[in-house]
Image (cartoon, grey):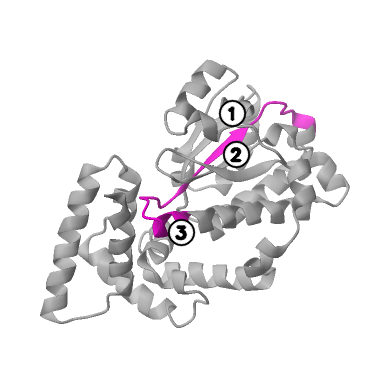
Amino acid sequence: MYRLFPLFISFFSVSRMNTSRNCSLKLLATVILIVLISKCECTIVEEDLKITQSQKETLDKFRARMSPIVPHAYMRDNIYLIRWLRAKNFNLKDAELFLRENLKWRKSTGMDKIHSEDYSKAVLEFPIYVDAVDKNGAPVITCLLGVHDIRQAHLTGRAPMFLRFVDKIMDEAEMKVRNAQLEGKNVTRFQFVINLDGFNLVQHGCPNCVVGTLSFLSSYENHFPWLTDKIVIINAPPNIQAILQALRSAITDRTRRQIKIFGTDKNEWQKYLLSFIDKDQLTEDFGGTLVRHN
């Protein structure tokens, strides 16, 4: 059943026809898609694909405006464009400006070439991976943030490299979402799991550290909107609330609703993670059995 989702996504993405026959086809496809969604457990897909008639008209206008200027074919797909509209509550003008700014950023930072850059040393110092999937086939980012010496990275001038590495991971996760759709999986977002074991205010809560985290959050909100399903933080120390309060203004209400924080009770957070990610997809640090060979 899930292999039919990309077919309908593609149908709505390329459909620009106005004949009564094609309108009937679109109506039939809509009915079938609703039936498929109702029979699967993935409410994420329903939330991402379900739109009103008014929103569909706005989406059509948005596609017409953006299609001539986006550099890649996937950026003309409705499943991509709708994220930018949702981030701006379907305000056409705001969404257009939002996406245009993102295109400028991608060009100025060379994002299309980032995956050809060598980050083999970066992943050893800043262990962030996107090599797992959840039970629906969605990518899973795992981050051992507690072992990052963020303060030292700032003192030695390596912070920009670290932030670019994180952008690379986020972009890779987005690519894997698109690849999963092409493989027939009902995937529109990825999961993000952060382990704070080893966190301390000196290495992670210094003023420069907070500024760096704000830079990451700004990049996430502005360049990868509506791409995460769950953001799970495990092994959070009691003083994490002070840091989160400082970061609160940098994230949207939607992102705040996605964040779920667990303390150091492994039984509690492991049970939650394994409810949507298989054990063999997670390393021991995240309650799994995966052995990663770097």
Q: Which residues are magenta?
A: 177-202
Spatial CA distance of label 3 from label 2 is: 19 Å
The residue depicted at 42 percent of the width and 28 percent of the height is 275
Q: Quadrant of the C terminus?
A: top right
Spot occupied by residue 184 in the image (x, y as percentages of width and height):
36, 55
Mark closer to the chain start, 1 or 3: 3
Tell me the amino acid under the disc marked 2. Answer: Thr
- Residue labelled with disc 3: 178
Q: Residues within 10 Å of mark 3 (few under 14, many from 20)?
A: many
Do callouts 2 and 1 mark residues in contact (Cβ within 8 Å)?
Answer: yes
- Residue labelled with disc 1: 286
Tell me the amino acid under the disc marked 3. Answer: Arg
Q: Is residue 176 magenta?
A: no
The residue depicted at 49 percent of the width and 56 percent of the height is 225
Spatial CA distance of label 1 from label 3 is: 25 Å
Tell me the amino acid under the disc marked 1. Answer: Phe
Do callouts 1 and 3 mark residues in contact (Cβ within 8 Å)?
Answer: no
Spatial CA distance of label 2 from label 1 is: 8 Å
- Residue labelled with disc 2: 142
